[in-house]
Amino acid sequence: METVIIVIHLMVVVALVAVIMLQKSEGGALGIGGGGGGGFMTGRGTANVLTRTTTILAAAFFATSIVLTLLARSGGDVPSIFDSAPTSSGAPAGETPADGTSGGSVLDQIKKLEDNQPPASPQAPQSQ
């Protein structure tokens, strides 16, 4: 269900950008037609159609955004990144806590993990 709504949401976004870019610019330089007189999208009727299409697509964008938000919130307990974060030991950065635990910041822990891995050096192909 959520995947279908995401696909619809992305299609609405692409259509919304396309319709906005097709509109005649009124002083700004964002429209494809520019502020000049020529172009295949001219006339008052076409402007009304593009304006209505933009309004409908904007409403669909907001609707799919709200539905996706509600689906994400109703999915149960979503684990937070703060739940798995290491607890602070209270020691200043760069110092080992007095109780002998490793502690340290997340960056220190990543550095320890990288130090435990053997260095990856490029290898030349072996001739047979």
Image (spheres, grey):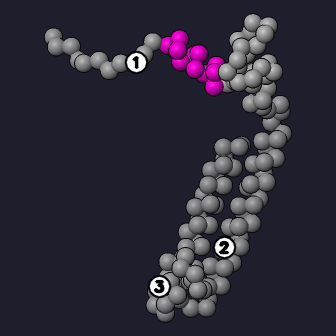
State whether residue 103 is above or below residue 55.
above
Classify the position of the N terminus by image quarter.
top right
Q: How crowded is mark 3: few (under 14 residues within 10 Å), some or many (20 or more)?
A: few
User: Label 3 amino acid?
Assistant: Phe
State whether residue 90 is above or below residue 17.
above
Cα separation, mark 1 vs mark 3, equals 58 Å
* Element on which disc 3 rests: loop
Cα separation, mark 3 vs mark 2, equals 18 Å
* Element on which disc 1 rests: loop
Q: Position of residue 41 (x, y in %)?
A: 52, 84
Q: Nearer the viewer, mark 1 or mark 2?
A: 1
Q: Where is residue 9 in the image (x, y as percent from the top left)?
A: 66, 55
Indicate left or right for 95 with 71 as reference. left
Of residues 99 and 25, the one nearer the viewer is 99
Give the extent of the magenta segment.
107-117
Q: Where is residue 73 in the image (x, y as percent from the top left)?
A: 82, 41
Q: Which residue is drawn at 59% across and 73% down?
A: 20
State whether residue 80 is above or below residue 42.
above
Q: Does the stretch in magenta take in 111?
A: yes
**Location of mark 2 (residue):** 54
Q: Which residue is drawn at 49% across and 77% down?
A: 32
User: Label 2 amino acid?
Assistant: Thr
Of residues 127 and 107, the one nearer the viewer is 107
Quadrant in the rendering for residue 71: top right
User: Label 1 amino acid?
Assistant: Ala
Q: Which of marks 1 and 3 is nearer the N terminus?
A: 3
Q: How crowded is mark 1: few (under 14 residues within 10 Å), some or many (20 or more)?
A: few
Contact between marks 1 and 2 (CB within 8 A): the answer is: no
Name the disc covering residue 40, or none.
3
Quadrant in the rendering for residue 125: top left
Name the disc covering residue 86, or none.
none
**Location of mark 1 (residue):** 120
